[in-house]
Amino acid sequence: MKKLFCIISAIFIVTGYGIAQQVLDKIAAVVGDDIILQSELMQYSLNLAFQYKIDPRKNPDQFEQLQRETLQNLINQKILVAKAKEDTIEVDERQVDTVLEEQINRMIQQLGSEKKLEEQLNMSISKIKRTFREDVRKNLMVEKLQQTKFSQIKITRREIEEFYNTMKDSLPELKEIVDISHILLEIKAGKESERVAREKIDELLQRVKQGEKFEDLCRQYSEDPGNKDRGGEIGFMQRGDFVPEFEEVAFLLEPGEISDIVKTRFGFHIIQCIDRKGDKINVRHLLIRLEANPGDESATEEQIKAIRAMFDKPEANFEELAKQYSDDATTKEQGGHIGKFEVENLQEREFVTAIQQLKPGELSQPFKTRFGWHILKLNERQEPRKISLQTDWDKIELWALTSKRQNEFNKWLDEAKKDVYVDIKPN
């Protein structure tokens, strides 16, 4: 089921493989009253290939096997969603919003910035949310269905011991684990960069006021790759789809009305309301981004070095300085605490290099990643070791319980499939 839920929780990453777009769409499978399109199958398969580091061009057989597994998992997903609807499973829309936000944030962290995510998917953040919201809702419905049917399954001490004795030779060793904190300084556009961007957007606003077609200016000058080719049109959005500064102005506009200049963390915008439908509006915008220049990067480097020098004084407190200076909004209020991680799973290799040079309690010298400049603190290190009942009972209990519930889930799913018409079309 791990692969299944990897499938149904995925938000697509458009990779550089350059295939699939050339194939005319057709039906890959029929599941009850629903269908799975070849494009849908290819999109999920490419996303998983990206995650598993499989290049379809270099490993076509491996990719073909992945496609077969993906198709079966998509069939299972549609059966599960149908069963969830039969059981009138409902999910809280606020939970959908929260999970969607978490998944988008993970993608932003993986790619390095919101701008890179928008370029990768060729969509604005607001459109990404609208596009994948229904997938998140279905995933939560299936998870809730599973919890309803299988969360009551318990496991005995004897079953845990039997699971360990049966599986101990195949259970993974515990890898090296570190507990880390950091102070992050993002490389932000300084006053000179902001002045240049402001002059550019001011000139464009004057051209709009002088009668030039706003849509054409968006196509020519907007720096939002997700919608500039559509004349800056974002599409219908509701409150919560975009940043507050943007929404505050956009929702005050009447159809056809064009705003003054609006500043957000992405840069400077000019917004036009196209249409209203209930509590939703369709808008277009022209964006001039705030881009850091080499001088801004140098200034950030000097600032992080100055913060690092503060720790030369015995009274310096890492947690307090992280709260005061760090730009990482998700960790600064926790004193910069990031959490515990297996070292080999850390995506930022600069973090691994820094960790390897530290003892528990020590701080790194400033180093740079795609996110900005960091000072890293190693709070704790756990060396690799074998798993045992004596030291890892809770972990083994969780694995055994998950395995038991998985087996029961598989039995239930096999029975559910008997009630649903499935027709897999030839490739």
Image (cartoon, rainbow, N blue to C red):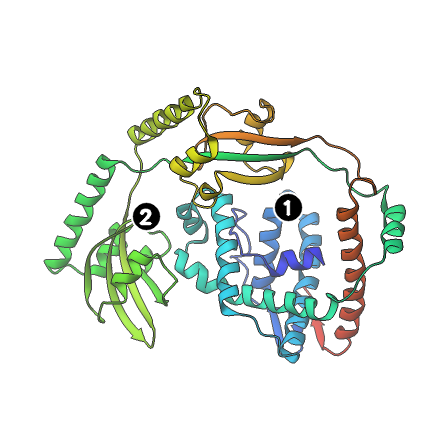
In the rendered image, the residue lying farthest to the top is: 312
Q: Badge 2: how crowded within 10 Å, few (<14), some, or many (20+)?
A: few
Q: Which quadrant of the view contains residue 357? A: top right
Q: In the figure, residue 242 lies in which quadrant?
A: bottom left
Q: Which residue is mark 1?
A: 52
In this view, 278 is above or below 23? below
Indicate the secondary structure of the residue bearing disc 1. helix
User: In the figure, residue 75 lies in which quadrant?
Assistant: bottom right
List x then y, in percent, for residue 204. Answer: 17, 51
Circle on res. 265: 2
* Residue at (24% x, 37% y) in the render: 193
Q: Nearer the viewer, mark 1 or mark 2?
A: 2
Q: Amino acid at mark 1?
A: Tyr
Left/right of residue 33 with respect to residue 165 in the rendered view: left
Q: Nearer the viewer, residue 315 or 187?
A: 315
Q: Specify whether residue 130 is in view.
A: yes
The answer to which of 373 and 216 lies nearer the viewer is 373
257, 47: nearer the viewer: 257
* The N terminus, quarter of image: bottom right
Depth check, front residue: 4 or 399: 399
Q: Is residue 226 above or below residue 35?
A: above
**Structural distance between the alpha carbons of marks 1 and 2:** 33 Å
Q: Label 2, secondary structure: give it.
A: loop
Lateral position of residue 387 relative to residue 298, left or right: right
Q: Residues within 10 Å of mark 1 (few under 14, many from 20)?
A: few
Residue lying at 89% horizontally and 54% vertically, measured from the top left: 158
Q: Residue at x 79, y 46 (%)?
A: 393
Quadrant placement of the C terminus: bottom right
Q: Amino acid at mark 2?
A: Arg
